[in-house]
Image (tube, rainbow, N blue to C red):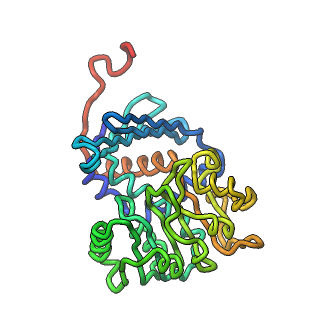
Amino acid sequence: MRVLSEADVESLTVIPDAIALAWEAYCLQAKGSVPAPLRGDLRRDDPKAGCLMLVGANGPDHLAVKSNVHAYPGGLDAPRRWNSLLTLWDWRRAEPRALIAARAFNDHRTAAGFAAGANRLARPDATTLAVFGAGKSAPMAVRYMKAVRPSLDRVMLVGRDPGRVAALAGTVRSWSEFAGVEVASVSAQDAAAAADIIVTVTTSEAPVFPGAAVKPGACIVLGGANRPGAREADDALMVRADIYLDARAGVTEKAGDIRLALASGALRPDQMRAEIGTCGEGPLPLSPGSDVLVFKSMGLAIQDVVLAQHLVEIAEQRGLGQIVDLAGADGGKGGHV
């Protein structure tokens, strides 16, 4: 088995390749050619901790099992600690092919999915990006959006913690592709009104920007707060929107942005136009009464599988990672479970 560290993942991940792989995953999902994933969410309150597990497969040979674990070892007033690991299996042979440190992997996989959706929905000449949220997913979300829309010349950042927003702005400015790009902290109102593309990566329970302020023709990627009772977009936005999904299955139960807007009557079922992977090339016409395009991303297990497959194949070609023999005396052929 090959073990890939966080540094290995960073060295192996190429942004355009990751976006292309995310689009491949969306197309596989839309074609119905991948089995339904397994998702488990284990939580405790005393002491507070949690584990999210996601299992997905691609054909008979490739299986990925990912676990995201968090805890508060210093108490709830101390910073949260979290880590993530992904095991890629050769399913046909029942052999673990690789163990991947998945903190950076998750950031790249998530941002690549956002970018693949926005690349299909956002106007080709978009110049302004607004990102709501300044947590761990935000930096890569900004960087990947620039990869699909090089025309971006203004990035507006909105967050609750001024220090985290300032740190995010500094990170963005340090990347060479953002030379000459204006990067600034602005209000939610101003960001919503000016942006051609809006990306939300928050844990908010309530809407984070005024939907009525969003200009016609904007593309909105709703990527955070993926819980039944949480939402990032208000009814004023959803009533105006044609909505595209990474997957239809479970979205009306799991995604508060969808579930709560349906319950209020702001969103009609027919506004959920399609899974994004069904959308071919060419402009997507807006439905009567709609003037914005929304991509609701919940994240798919198949995204994990195809990206992990790719990184492991490149690592094998380059001889990266550490090889660990887990077979044991019987070569993994027998024994009790």
Residue 198 visible in this rendered orientation of the protein: yes
Task: Tell me residue 207's x, y (percent).
Answer: 53, 63
User: In the image, is 65 to the left or to the right of 249?
Assistant: left
Residue ID at (51%, 70%): 209
Which image quadrant for residue 3? top left
Which image quadrant for residue 153? bottom left
Which is more toward the observer, 162 or 243?
Answer: 162
Which quarter of the rendering shows the N terminus? Answer: top left
In the figure, 58 relative to 257: above or below? above
Which is more toward the observer, 323 or 227?
Answer: 227
Which is more toward the observer, 19 or 333?
Answer: 19
Residue ID at (32%, 83%): 179
In the figure, 258 relative to 321: above or below? below
Task: Tell me residue 170's x, y (percent).
Answer: 27, 74
Task: Tell me residue 292's x, y (percent).
Answer: 64, 73
Task: Tell me residue 233's x, y (percent).
Answer: 56, 63
In the figure, 259 relative to 121: above or below? above
Residue ID at (47%, 45%): 305
Which is more toward the observer, 307 or 106?
Answer: 106
Residue ID at (55%, 72%): 210
> Among all residues in the image, which is located at the extreme bottom?
180
Which quarter of the rendering shows the C terminus? Answer: top left
> Among all residues in the image, which is located at the extreme right?
288
